[in-house]
Image (spheres, rainbow, N blue to C red):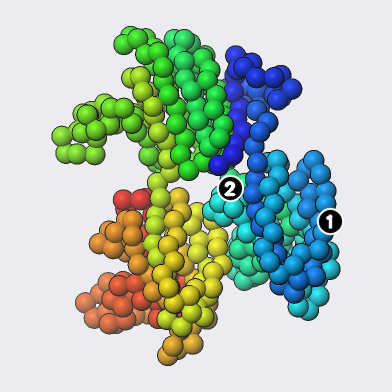
Amino acid sequence: MKGYCRTVLALILASPANFVAGSSASGRFLTHLGGEQITFRLRGVRGDESVTIDDGSSTTTETLTREWKQYTRARPHKLFIWFNNDAASRDVRFEAVDPTPQNTVIEYDSESWAGWNCGQTNENTRCNKVRAGWLNWAGKYVVSFREITFRLKGDSGEESVTIEAGSTTITTTLITEWVDYTFARPSELSIKFHNDNGGKRDVLFQAQDPTLQNLVIKNSDTWDGWNCGETNENPWCNNVRAGSFAWNGTYVVSSKQITFKLRGDTGEERVTIEAGNSRIFKELTKEDEVFTFEAPHALFITFWNDDGPSRDVRFTAVDPPPQDTVIQNLDTWGDWGCGHTNENTWCNIVRNGNFAWGGRYSVTSQEYRLV
């Protein structure tokens, strides 16, 4: 995953042309801009769709075929794609490669987006088609990318660290004030503390987005020796989880994740998956497909096209496991009396992962702070 970062003025380790100076309430910073890329694919449904691609530094217009074409561009703040010649059978398909679809946001830059109530509880189903990369309407589409934002400071101002986020690596000496860092969200962030002296030198980490409760932080050099995660774990484990890097070593920061499988009985089932800020519209097949998202505050799966006897969706929890997962159909739960002594037998069918009725299903787990 590619990224950019904000870091302190002391980071004049590369050509000044690659940095833009600035300031914030937390201190001075520079923004690293060089060497990052995005990769995505486009194709047409009919094979004669015209698109214009603007990555901020260049604009190209071309005609798509029915085969996927892959593009790699310098990573812009936003990517713009115009669909120029929409007609009855012409549609464009977009697929994010790097950053991944979960870390890519697609919106339709048109009055229709507001008219469709996108982002509201009563939004039009077209909103999720756009988010899934179905560019079915003429006009401009805006593609942006999720980020990770955090702050670092040193107790003494002498602490030396190396930050690795995807392909970006930076070594710097921290100051005693908070400094903000922002990267394109990688699968894993590492911060290596080089020069602990057992005394005043410590590194402090403060999560911004995602928040601390949605992150997992470990010192990979000490974790096993401290028995972290075991009943007899060293109390220093919780110091690290709270963002206190008081020992030399590599601190690995990753997002808590939820993993599950979905399939359809007929292969025609259509669902929308909502996990935090990610929304994906998906046509299922008869084979299990694995989905992994950053553990959200709420996971919802909406089954759109139940037909009664044939179309059903099958959900299988992976992590957290089935015994730690609670599933409900929000549209029927109260009417069925679920949770009461005389509940309908259909309640347990849903709890076992059989989505045999249309509607909105919630998946919750206390372990992953889903609500």
Which mark lies nearer to you, 2 or 1?
Answer: 1
Residue 278 position by quadrant = bottom right
Furthest toward the left, the residue is: 232
In the rendered image, which residue does mark 2 sit on? 99
One can see residue 73 in this view: yes
Q: CA distance from mark 2 to mark 1?
A: 23 Å
Q: Is residue 206 above or below residue 327?
A: above
Q: Residue at x 68, y 66 (%)?
A: 67
- Pick whichever, 155 or 185, lies toward us: 185
Q: Residue at x 54, y 28 (%)?
A: 169
Please, what secondary structure does the residue beneath circle 2 have? loop
In the rendered image, which residue does mark 1 sit on? 61
Q: Is residue 162 left or right of residue 101?
A: left
Q: Is residue 256 left or right of residue 34?
A: left
Quarter of the image with the N terminus is top right
How packed is label 2: few (under 14 Cα within 10 Å), some, or many (20 or more)?
Answer: many
One can see residue 330 in this view: no
Q: Residue at x 27, y 31 (%)?
A: 223
First in sequence: mark 2 or mark 1? 1
How packed is label 1: few (under 14 Cα within 10 Å), some, or many (20 or more)?
Answer: some
Three-letter code for the amino acid on which mark 1 is drawn: Thr
Q: Position of residue 369 (x, y in %)?
A: 37, 50
Pointers 2 and 1 in contact (C-beta within 8 Å): no
Furthest toward the bottom, the residue is: 309
Q: Position of residue 109 (x, y in %)?
A: 75, 57
Q: Is residue 210 left or right of residue 200?
A: right
Three-letter code for the amino acid on which mark 2 is drawn: Pro
Please, what secondary structure does the residue beneath circle 1 have? strand
Q: Position of residue 154 (x, y in %)?
A: 46, 16
Residue 117 position by quadrant = bottom right
Q: Is residue 84 above or below residue 332?
A: above
